[in-house]
Amino acid sequence: MKIAAAQTLVSSDIAANGAAIRTMLATAAGDGARVINFCEGALSGYSKLQMMHPDDWASFDWQQQEAELRAIASLCGELHIFAVIGGAHRLSGGYPPHNSLYVFSETGALLTRYDKRFLSNSELGGWYSPGTEPITFDVDGYRMGCAICIESQFPEVFEEYERLGVDAVLFSSYGIPDYFQIALRAHAGLNCIWIGAATPVQKAHKGPAGIIGPDGKWATQCPAAAEPNLATTVLDRDNPVYDIPLQKARPWRRRARKGDIYREQIVDDPRSRERGGY
């Protein structure tokens, strides 16, 4: 099954962002992709990068964003493609919005929404409200999870998704700097999963969109150029290239993490207990 990670221009113009997303959706569908993820804030813009102050949420055009989300959903149905779209999600009661990923199915239905759980220090300053739980969804027998930006620095996010049986994590960020790339490659290799990483055009020079294989290596990357682009790869559990991570390492590590294979062979030996002698 082919997946795609997008690299699109993100501006303060919601309609322009929506048009850019729909153009890339059509490109991905034409290339045979079944699911595509876009960057953090791809539709709404991202906090202080497209806005000046958290109070600006009071004048944010939520109706325009909803109209664009509905248009994107409709196009997903026409093209028969799943899409993960970055955008703010309005809350009631005057709370800051969630920093979210909207998940649309190939029928145009809004399947679910992932809300960023590990917010950055600046995001907690009135920009966003934290989410509370992971989400998964299935495409053609492959299970997907979602993560956003600074969550790349929290191993527990990816370990949890491994326990939930995902094949891939769709990672959406407003930039993928070197230390994000190092962490993502480690998470992919340690958990034996694919990671699709989406970013905006204006941050591509620091790390373009791409997809990491379950061996921790980049399977594909866009050019590091300030232009819209698309990275695609095929998820195949039977690909011999990934035989060791998928067929051997992942099931063995799952057993190892439970600990039974070690507890069964713990020895009662005075030379084991004594740590001060040779």
Image (cartoon, rainbow, N blue to C red):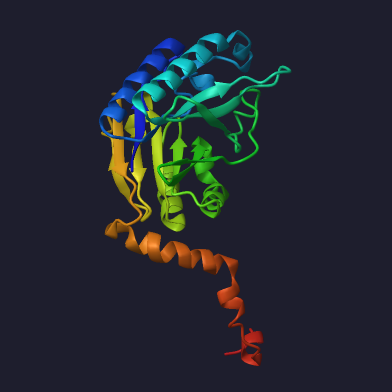
Q: Position of residue 138 (x, y in %)?
A: 47, 42
178 sits left or right of 93 in the view: left
Q: Quadrant of the N terminus?
A: top left
Q: Residue visible at 46% across and 20% down?
A: 43
Q: Residue visible at 62% across and 19% down?
A: 90
Front in this rendered view, residue 70 or 116: 70
Q: Quadrant of the C terminus?
A: bottom right
Residue 127, quarter of picture: top right
163 sits left or right of 23 in the view: right
Q: Which residue lies furthest to the right in this view?
A: 93
Q: Can residue 13 be seen in this view?
A: no
Q: Residue visible at 51% across and 39% down?
A: 147
Residue 80, quarter of picture: top left
- Vertical side of 176 occupied by 160: above or below: below
Front in this rendered view, residue 82 or 256: 82
Q: Residue visible at 56% across and 76% down?
A: 261
